[in-house]
Amino acid sequence: MLIDEVTINIKAGNGGSGSASLRRTAQTSKGGPDGGNGGIGGNVYAIGVSDITALSQFQFKKEIRAENAISGGRNNLYGRNGVHTIIKVPLGTQIIDIKTLDFIEITDMTTQVLLATGGKGGLGNNALKTALNQTPTVVEQGATGELKRMRFILRLIADIGLVGLPNAGKSSLLSVLTNANPKIANYPFTTLEPNLGVFNKLVIADIPGLIEGASKGKGLGIKFLKHIEKTKIILHCIDASIEDPISAYHTVRQELLRYNSSISEKKEMILLTKIDLATKEKIERLKNNLAIFTDTVLTVSIYEESSLKKLKEHISKTLQEN
């Protein structure tokens, strides 16, 4: 099961306290202060990875902590800083601070994004001595590291999003266009989570089948509709062999727009699938009827290599133009 939303506590490390120490040696029984400063607590960072399942690490682990720093010691020894913690999250993850609602999005695999800052180390008595107080015995305590409650929401970053009613042929198409191996069967809701595939360096996301009312929480759609927001092109798959393909188009399109009206600004291509199961007359009629909704209506059968070749060429050309 794909985990694409989690809420966890992020705790940076506490700073180490300063040391209250007076120098004592065989030659000096009452030396001056030599207490060292405490170290700085570890930070918590996030970094992007290509693994879309990376949020599954938080399914049962609800708190991430960085290491606390070590307190200062005698002989002006400074405490060791706490080790930073770096958590790996999928590219496209939005991280929201629940208290402030500030957010940041993870868009690359090289930038470490600071989530929580470790506490400062306290000063030891050597650093606190003054002209009026040459032997202070009170020191600073280490500061507490930041504690934040944060929500991680994954929105897949894909060039193309395959959408359509359940059993519209999306998973089969993904498998022949790319090296993906989604579960395929002749019944609705075979796909229970998004699948990704790549061809010609283009990422294709197979979004689980939508049904009427998906934007209000029916079926599986509401859980995965967010994954369509990042795609450059929507490839709307419609089974050419069903009784009312036009109604199927309207059902899915309306659910997409109810969820996010800005989806209307995305390039949409309609793809009639399973054309080997429909007559040529029906296919031509559907192409004409669907042409009023988009300037691109394509046809494909996974059993016709020529139709797959034309589809690949058209997708590549369209993405180069957009």
Image (cartoon, helix red, strand yellow):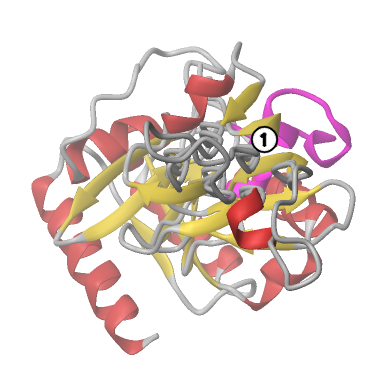
Residue closest to the eye, 201 or 23: 23
- Classify residue 313 by image quadrant: bottom left
Residue that numbered label 1 is attached to: 11
- Residue 45: x and y in percent read 50, 49
> From what the image shows, is residue 112 above or below residue 145?
below
Residue closest to the eye, 109 or 224: 109
Residue closest to the eye, 37 or 70: 37
> From what the image shows, is residue 230 above or below residue 249?
below
- Classify residue 225 by image quadrant: top right
Residue lying farthest to the front in this orientation = 27
> From what the image shows, is residue 233 above or below residue 198?
below
For the image shown, how many numbered marks are present on the structure?
1
> Label 1 crowding class (10 Å Cα cut-off): few <14, some 14-19, many 20+?
many
Q: Is residue 223 magenta?
A: yes
Which span of residues is magenta-colored? Answer: 209-227
Name the kind of residue labelled 1 in the image. Answer: Lys
- Residue 284: x and y in percent read 43, 60
Q: Is residue 278 magenta?
A: no
Residue at screen point 67% across, 30% down: 6
- Classify residue 176 by image quadrant: top left
Residue 117 makes an appearance in the image = no
